[in-house]
Amino acid sequence: MIEARGLTKRYGDKLAVDGLTFDVRPGVVTGFLGPNGSGKSTTMRCIMGLDAPSAGSVHVNGRPYADLPWPLREVGALLEARAIHPGRSAWAHLWMLAQANDLPRKRVDEVLSLVGLDGVARRRVGKFSLGMGQRLGIAAALLGDPAVLLFDEPVNGLDPDGIRWVRNLLKGLAAEGRTVFVSSHLMSEMALTADHVVVIGRGRLIAEMPVAQLTGSSPRRYVRVRSPRLAELRAALEADGATVAPDSDGALAVRGLDAPRIGDLAASLGLPLHELALQQASLEEAFMALTEHDVEYHGEAVVGLPPPSPADRVELDTNGTRP
Amino acid sequence: MTLAAPTQLGSPGTGRLAPLPPGRYGLLGALRSEWTKLRTVRSTLWTLGITVVLGIGLGAVAAATTAARWTTASLAEQLTFDPVRVSLTGILLAQLAVGILGVLVMTAEYGTGTIRATLAAIPHRRLVLVAKGIVFGLVALVVGEVVSFAAFFLGQSLLTAPAPHTTLGAPDVVRAVVGGGLYLTVLGLLALGLAAIIRHTAGAISAFVGILLILPLIVAALPSSIGGPIGRYLPANIGVTLVSVRSDPASFAPWVGLGVLAGYAAALLVLGGVLLRRRDA
């Protein structure tokens, strides 16, 4: 259980985190979403007691991190990959952490084989790939078998197999009753992994809700309908209170009526339907809609560069295929 | 790559949380952790190796050279000759290697980010610094004394007649030889304190070298009415006095000097501890 109450962090005159209040509960994976520079990492560092809040508080298992009697047995964290001395072996890195919290030596071997690094345990970390470094960070987080786990961008640098493994690991940890708090900029990944999300922008809380609710409440949710008798269908739908707009491929985008109601209505009028599909906004779209006013650094559209003309492309293709 | 396929891996395995043991983390765990950290990086081996080689070798070269040239040395040189000081010449270079290790014990954690893992395991930050001081201090003491005694015995054996040599039984000799090791230890702790304040390897080493080598040059350039009274406070002067049998009236008495040096180290470590607690990691 993580409880942030009015958590505020100021660096000089820059407000990095501004009065955040949220709970991260056990038993589910909670995603932590926000644009770059929105204060995710600062929040994570405050939870870990690495940075002191300027105001407010954040408690883990009911107390500030610094007051935990056995921190590694209660909280495991992957804050940034490769925060490890490159000259030390993976085993030595974990062993020195284990010793600090009186963890048994065999636990080091256990977590190393858990993340698949037992074969390279004695190799210097500086020789590790990004993905191996990430696994070692995850091993360190799991070392104390903690009830609370924090992961900052855990799938960075992992290959598809590794990403799937992390996804299952996070879900498995939550299913065991642990509190799992994971930040990521990969919305598609969060949509697959997280049950609950905390969304922040410019250091402020924007939303805290189940993922399903976040995607379900988006204005981009609508029902897509196609019919050979589109005009009649449209009139009937509008008469029933729906807002109808044209969608791609000659379909209609219907808002204000759900799919069963539209199907029933069409059936009662004898209008054939060739498509009737709920268009759910992706988490990414829902996130973009929520945070579009809170992005710190907007990218600027590149102007003055016309798209390549078809003629150019033809020429390139011709050149490319010429024997 | 010899990685197991990640999809074959299981969950953390227990499925059930182990109950927390009674008590809490403490100094013993911190000491064991620091000892593991110190002995599992190569920089420790390098800096201590250089300490041994310089500390023993330079004194041996100085002693052998002195013995070879004894008959051609001036009377003044012969009268002021201090066989202990000559054999311990290397201490005054080995101090740089010990200081660099003292700096790295702290700054390597910041440079690599390991400090965050360390503080996650031991949130009580001053405990971390205390553990580092004890572990590094003991290592520096053992290595320092071994180097000092080895340099003394080797140097004396190379000071062949007609050059005079001395023994541990002669007045002040044990003090000078033991003092050589203590000097390295206290200076190493001073470097650790600097590193806790500065947190960057290059900056902390520069400050350490500046205090040892540059500060004496500045003091020497001052008018003697100002530079004279200041000189005795310089760590380098305190070191020379400690490893000499002959006393210099302008300097502190050896143990007083060591006390002054320990005072510097303590002040820097306390300041480092305060900053460590106050600053964001």
Image (cartoon, rainbow, N blue to C red):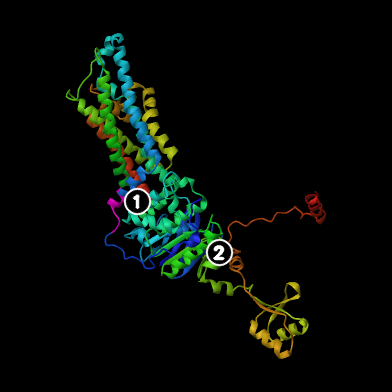
Amino acid found under the numbered disc labelled 2: Glu
From the top left corner, tell me how far across and down residue A269 is, in percent: 73, 90
Label placed on residue A119: none
Q: Nearer the viewer, mark 2 or mark 1?
A: 2
Judged left or right of residue B9, residue A279 is: right
From the top left corner, tell me how far across and down residue A98 is, in percent: 35, 54
Crowdedness near tag 1: few (<14), some (14–19) or many (≥20) residues, C-alpha within 10 Å: many
Quadrant of image for the N terminus of chain A: bottom left
In whole angstroms, how far apart are the C-alphas of marks 2 and 1? 36 Å
- Judging from the image, mark 2 belongs to the subunit labelled A
Crowdedness near tag 2: few (<14), some (14–19) or many (≥20) residues, C-alpha within 10 Å: some
**Magenta span dominant secondary structure:** helix
From the top left corner, tell me how far across and down residue B101 is, in percent: 37, 38
- Judging from the image, mark 1 belongs to the subunit labelled B
Residue at point 81% right, 56% down? A310
Residue A264, picture quadrant: bottom right
Q: What residue did someone put label 1 on? A: B125
Magenta includes B129?
no
Q: What residue did someone put label 2 on? A: A189
Judged left or right of residue A240, residue B67 is: left
Residue placed most toward the observer, B171 or B65: B65
Q: Is mark 1 on a helix, strand or loop?
A: helix
Residue placed most toward the observer, B85 or A299: B85
Q: What element carries label 2?
A: helix
Amino acid found under the numbered disc labelled 1: Arg
Residue B109 visible somewhere in the drawing = yes
Magenta includes B26?
yes
From the top left corner, tell me how far across and down residue B137 is, in percent: 29, 40
Residue at point 34% right, 24% down? B58
In the rendered image of this protein, does residue B15 appear above or below residue B48? below
Query: Magenta residues, as a range?
Result: B24-31
In the rendered image of this protein, does residue B46 appear above or below residue A145? above
